[in-house]
Image: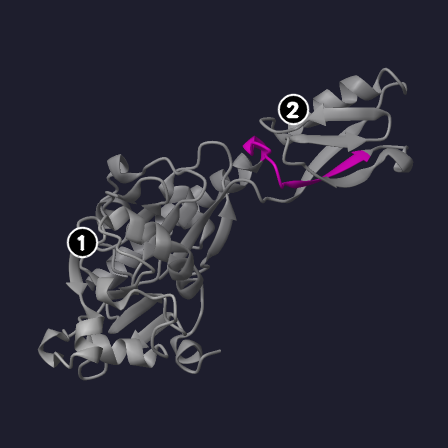
Amino acid sequence: MKPNLLKSILIGVLILFLAPLSLARADEYILGSGDVVEISVWGHSDLSRIVTIRPDGKLSLPLIDEVMATGLTPKQLDEKITEILSEHIPEPKVTVIVMEFKSKKIYVVGEVNKAGVYPIFGKTMLLEAISMAGGVKPEANLKKGTILRPDEGVLNVDFYKLLVRGDMSENILLRSGDTIFLPNSKENMVYVLGEVLHPGLYPIGEKLTFLEAVSLAGSTTSDASPRYAEVVRGDLKNPEIIKVNLEQIIRKGEIDKDILLKPGDVVYLPKSDMAEFNKVLKSILPTLQAIVLGVQASDIIQGK
């Protein structure tokens, strides 16, 4: 049996097993600021509302001045509102449904079947997130997958051990804001991010230098600090950071300092010197998420 086919079968079994679990755990979702809930009071349409939980964690309803919703599950909020309303109407029947999950979410991007933004319910594990995204595609590079956590940088996780070997030690607990990224094993592209006019994903072709990549991205913005440009290369868990003084290359004509790029390289033009990789990662993460969340390379190249 071909390795890719075997991998697909093993991953498919895991996804089928986990899908019902992910749906069942929606009831465990912990409400937070920004979530939109529908509160229905049976027989009292004048009391029913669709409301957004305020930044202070509270919401308001008729007959109820304020009620704290943050930190509760929908069922717990249901019970709390029922208890308060029972002081005003006999035996109220209340239903709370989450209409929009906005407070706690993760990003699943790259070579998965349904890349996107997903809410997390209670304790959400990595396998459940992959299940929500419809599983990984056969062309996913499981050896170079990463989890980017804004406050901590890159987490160490081996997707191959988890999905193919079933090693549950790699099935880590996710946090709101995590980005799960599975790159393409055959990708011959580079990312050009930061202070360029058209940040995006660009093909290497036969060869591509740092200067050529910046040119493809429409050159630098007026805020860029070209002397502090960088190339982030290799596994993001332990990347090689290559400093490139673009100012010397352009203004002084020192072409020998223009380096050849490799597939998967991230070309980054900062606003200022950013020596620490975690600072670089935090700056490029929003753009990287937007690019991998379904934006086509052809659209980026055409400036759409």
Residue carrying label 2? 76
Residue at horizontal 27 percent and vertical 73 percent from the top: 189
The residue lying at 64 percent from left, 31 percent from top is 56
Q: Residues within 10 Å of mark 1 (few under 14, many from 20)?
A: few
122 vs 139, left or right, is right
- Rendered position, 56 above or below 178: above
Q: Secondary structure at mark 1?
A: loop
Q: Residue furthest left?
A: 256
Q: Is residue 135 visible?
A: no
Quarter of the figure with residue 2: bottom left
Q: How is the image coloured?
A: one colour
Q: Which span of residues is magenta-colored?
A: 27-40
Q: Position of residue 172 (x, y in %)?
A: 32, 37
Residue 74 is tagged as none
Where does the image place residue 295, in percent across and percent down from the top left? Answer: 44, 70
> Considering the numbered disc 2 on the image, is that residue within a helix, a strand or a loop?
helix
Numbered circles on residues, count: 2
> Which comes before the other along the chain, label 1 or label 2?
2
Q: Position of residue 181 (x, y in %)?
A: 34, 55
Work out whether residue 281 or residue 162 is closer to the camera in this orientation and state it. Answer: 281
Is residue 80 found left or right of 112 in the rendered image? right
Which residue, as the protein is rendered here, is positioned at the far front? Answer: 252
Query: Label 1 belongs to which residue?
Result: 239
Name the image quarter holding residue 153. top left
Q: CA distance from mark 1 to mark 2?
A: 45 Å
Which of the pair 244/9 is nearer the observer?
244
